[in-house]
């Protein structure tokens, strides 16, 4: 099942719905606990899709892919490299990514994102997927020019528009059997199976749950495959996971 948030083009009210063959069927209620169908269906031509949720937190993991299975380490590092991204950086598909003033390009990073569906604290790897509501496509936009020389990533990850999410949340997905792709101006740049993750989705979320209690609406970015490049004003980046859809954003200079 695919959940989406949208707005009628003639209205500012934000609505929720289920993606169907006929359009978006509006729903009411909390998608994490208690929601119900309505009989209202909107044609895609009449709406604008938004980011599929307003996250509670956005947490990313760095340097989490290798190029080939043989490159996977036999012994994992003791601690994954995690970072926060502010909720204010979240945008939906179709909204421009804005390059900050004083620089001319930023980096795209196509990723699988997991959305936590129920409170998770000190959980094991074996039960992680029981706590995931669904999955979406993310673009962990980065301005490495703002990375601190001591390794601090916060500023370079935090600008407004630097976390596109979408186009929807897919609840029926096997995260172990998908491919993460990215296309810059139509040219494929990233194309990796999630089996090339250094820390698997289960390992990283289980680890996080030993540090902090995860709650419904938390979004976990699971890392970006090799092949990420810089993009500039006038470009278009499409991050894609076939089972979820395409996250498509133009790039503009601030």
Image (tube, rainbow, N blue to C red):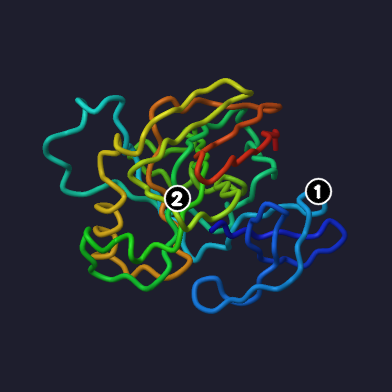
* Circle 1 or circle 2, nearest the eye: 1
Q: Secondary structure at mark 1?
A: helix
The answer to which quarter of the image holds residue 209 is: bottom left
Q: Position of residue 79 (x, y in %)?
A: 21, 49
Residue shown at 60% from the left, 32% from the top:
237
Query: Which is nearer the eye, 191 or 66?
Result: 191
Which residue lies most toward the front here? 21
Q: Position of residue 44 (x, y in %)?
A: 76, 50
Which residue extends farthest right?
Answer: 10
Task: Compare marks 1 and 2 and give the one earlier in the sequence.
Answer: 1
Residue displayed at 45% across by 70% down: 216
Q: Outermost residue, left direction?
A: 75
Question: What residue do we see at 70% from left, 33% from top?
Answer: 253
15 sits to left or right of 108 = right
> Considering the numbered disc 2 on the image, is that residue within a helix, a strand or a loop?
strand
Q: What x and y, as percent, mark residue 127?
A: 26, 63
**Mark 1 — residue?**
45
Residue 110: mark in rendering: none
Which residue is rendered at x = 26% and y = 44% of the image?
Answer: 199
Q: Mark 1 to mark 2: distance in Å?
A: 27 Å
Q: In x, y percent, where is residue 193?
A: 36, 34
Q: Between 244 and 218, which is closer to the camera in this rendering?
A: 244
User: How many marks on residues?
Assistant: 2
Q: Residues within 10 Å of mark 1 (few under 14, many from 20)?
A: few
Mark 2 packing: few (<14 Cα in 10 Å), some, or many (20+)?
many
When the figure is inspected, residue 229 is found, relative to residue 116, above or below; the finding is above
Give the residue furthest to the top: 187
Residue 113 - label: 2
Residue 115 lies left or right of residue 169; in this view the side is left
**Taking 53 as reference, is 174 above or below it?**
above
């Amino acid at each position: 099942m695919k959940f989406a948030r949208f707005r009628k083009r003639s209205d500012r009210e934000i609505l929720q719905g289920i993606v169907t063959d006929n359009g978006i069927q509006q729903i009411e209620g909390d998608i994490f606990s208690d929601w119900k169908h309505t009989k209202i269906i909107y044609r895609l031509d009449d709406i604008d899709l938004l980011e599929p949720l307003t996250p509670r937190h956005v947490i990313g993991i760095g340097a989490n892919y290798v190029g080939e299975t043989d490159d996977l380490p036999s012994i994992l590092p003791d601690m994954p490299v995690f970072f926060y991204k502010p909720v204010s950086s979240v945008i939906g598909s179709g909204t421009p990514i804005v390059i900050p003033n004083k620089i001319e390009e930023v980096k795209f990073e196509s990723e699988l994102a997991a959305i936590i569906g129920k409170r998770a604290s000190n959980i094991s790897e074996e039960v992680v997927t029981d706590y995931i509501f669904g999955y979406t496509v993310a673009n962990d936009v980065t301005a490495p020019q703002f990375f601190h020389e001591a390794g601090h990533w916060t500023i370079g990850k935090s600008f407004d528009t630097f976390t596109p999410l979408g186009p929807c949340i897919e609840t029926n997905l096997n995260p172990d059997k998908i491919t993460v792709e990215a296309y810059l101006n139509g040219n494929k740049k990233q194309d990796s199976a999630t089996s090339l993750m250094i820390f698997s989705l289960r390992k990283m979320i289980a680890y996080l749950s030993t540090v902090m209690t995860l709650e419904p609406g938390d979004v976990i970015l699971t890392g970006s495959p090799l092949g990420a490049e810089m993009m500039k004003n006038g470009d278009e980046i499409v991050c894609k996971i076939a089972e979820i859809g395409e996250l498509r954003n133009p790039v503009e200079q601030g």
